[in-house]
Each structure stands twice: as structure tokens, then as C-alpha cells.
Image (tube, helix red, strand yellow):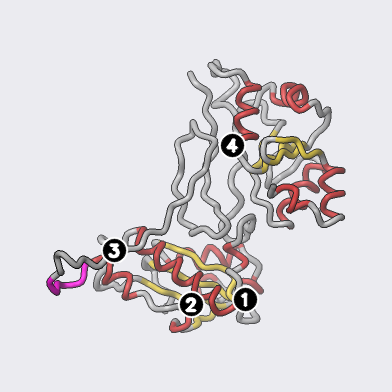
Amino acid sequence: MAASAQISRLHPIISPPLASRKPLISFSRFSPSFRCLSSPLSLSRPKTLTKPSYRNRVRASIRKLSESESIPIAKVPEDLDASIPAAAGVYGVFDANGELQFVGISRNIASSVDKHRKTVPADLCFSVKVGPADTATATATATADRTVLQSAWKSWVEEHISATGKPPSGNLQGNYTWTGAPPDLRLTPGRHVSLTVPLEDLIDRLVKEHKVVAFIKGSRRAPQCGFSQKVVGLLESHGVDFVCVDVLDEEHNFGLREKLKSYSNWPTFPQVFAGGELVGGCDIISDLAEKGELKAILQK
């Protein structure tokens, strides 16, 4: 049985929260492209005026970010404002200072906002603007399709960039405050599954197909040593888009610690790779961060 990897996520520099998943066999990631939904003008076959398509009607029904009303986000769970709809659409969450923090897409805006207020610091989740798809054209049984919602999401983000010169911080690459960090990568389906590809080849493929890989002790959310915790913290605080592999996971990464030491010729953990090359461990990552060179080195 060929080795597989639970490695999939969507995160370009600014990406819509709705992510498609790749098959587990692939280490590579992809992102949806935003397509223009309007048809090009045809000179040879002029179109007759017809009723607007469902897709265009739904897209037009979603207001601009600047035209949407700000709704306070109550802190008490049962007091969520009734004007926040349980419908498909886009939404923008603002902090206590009125600064847009995150633009999201949801099939149920009220549910998404409710989740944010339970998991995001209260000062970042103070109010929300919503852009629901028109209930007349997007009912519970015929919701706005994903392409339309992504188009509306893109429009809101671009509107904010035009006004401020920067995207919402929560939509930046490496910021997982709103979407949650991606799961750790697994090199194999399990230790009792026979591999048809040598483990060293899997390591080589992984570090070459991901921009930045951190091999750490423990998981990204719960590092098992101080050095691993420090490296994860530094990478996240510098907005680095990276993936983690738990070298202590004996079930899915059996034999990884010794094989990786041989592959990298580096005896300790954590180990951080960028562009397929070893950058170093905790000391080197810390030094680069102190010099202000970390992000530049990892983005080469």
C-alpha cells in the first residue's frame, strides 16, 4: 500500500476561509482561483435582454462592506443579535477600535460568528457586518454557490485594501486566529502499513514540496519541549506560512527521528527546512529572529 499523508490546506497570502481538500496522497497544496463571473461582450452575437441569472442575482444582492450595518457581538451566548442571519453569505468582524480584523465566508453566518466569539479574544470580536445572500434567491434548499460567495468575499477584501492600503490582519498568511492552525502532517497511514516508498524519500518529497517545514517534538498546538514551543511561536509571530511534523508520533511517523537526523546531518530537534534546505534548529531560528532576518530567509 502506498504511503499517504494527511497533508492538505489552502492558504495563499490572502485566502477565503472555505478551503477545498486535496487527496491524502499528495503533499502539495492548491488554492482556488477567482474567476470573473461576467460573460465577455460579444460583437458577433449580441445577447437579447434576459432575466438575470441566479448567480448574478445572488451576487448583486450582497451589499458592499461600506454599505453594510455594523452589528454588536454580544458576549452572552444566548444573546446573539437576531439580525445576524443564519444564512449563507460573507461577513466582516471588527475589533473594539472599529478596525476590520477578518472577512469570512459561511453557509451559516450566525453560526460562524458564534464560533468566533467563543474562540477569539473579545477585543478582536466586537462587532460584525454581514452580507447575506438574498433569501429570495438563496433559500435553505438552494443556497448561493461557492463561486459566488468567494467572489463576494474577494470584493469585500479588495474594498478594504482600497480604503486602508492593507488586507485584514486575520486574512493574512500565517494568521490562524480566526481559522485555526492546520493539522500536523503525517508521513504514513500507520506504523503497521508496509511502505512502498522509503521513508527518506518521503522526507525529501515533503521538505521540497512545502515552503517551510518544522519538525518538532509534539504537535503544533501542544509542543512537547521548550525549544519546539519557541520555534513554533517565532514562526507564527513572524507570519510565516509553515507546516509541522511531530517526530514523537510513533504511530504515523515511526522511525522519523533517526532517519531525519541522517537526512539532515543534524542531531537535534526541532529542525526547520525552507525551500527544501535545512535552516537550523532553535538557536539559529532565534538568532535570525533577533536580527530581523527570519522571514526574509524563510521566504527565499
Q: Which mark is residue 209?
A: 4
Extent of the magenta region: 48-53
Q: Which residue is mark 3?
A: 140
Q: Nearer the viewer, mark 4 or mark 2?
A: 4
Q: Which mark is residue 95?
A: 1
Residues packed near mark 3 inside 10 Å, few (<14), some (14 to 19) or many (20 plus): few
Magenta segment: does it hold 49? Answer: yes
Q: Nearer the viewer, mark 3 or mark 2?
A: 2
Determine the CA span between mark 4 and mark 1.
36 Å
Q: Earlier in the sequence, mark 4 or mark 2?
A: 2
Q: Which residue is mark 2?
A: 129
Determine the CA span between mark 1 and mark 3.
30 Å
Does 92 sit left or right of 39 as displayed?
right
Determine the CA span between mark 4 and mark 2.
38 Å
Q: Residue at x 21, y 66 (%)?
A: 42
Q: Earlier in the sequence, mark 1 or mark 2?
A: 1
Determine the CA span between mark 1 and mark 2.
12 Å
SS at mark 3 in the image? loop
Mark 1–mark 2 CB contact (< 8 Å): no
Give the amino acid at mark 3: Ala
Does 269 sit left or right of 19 as displayed?
right
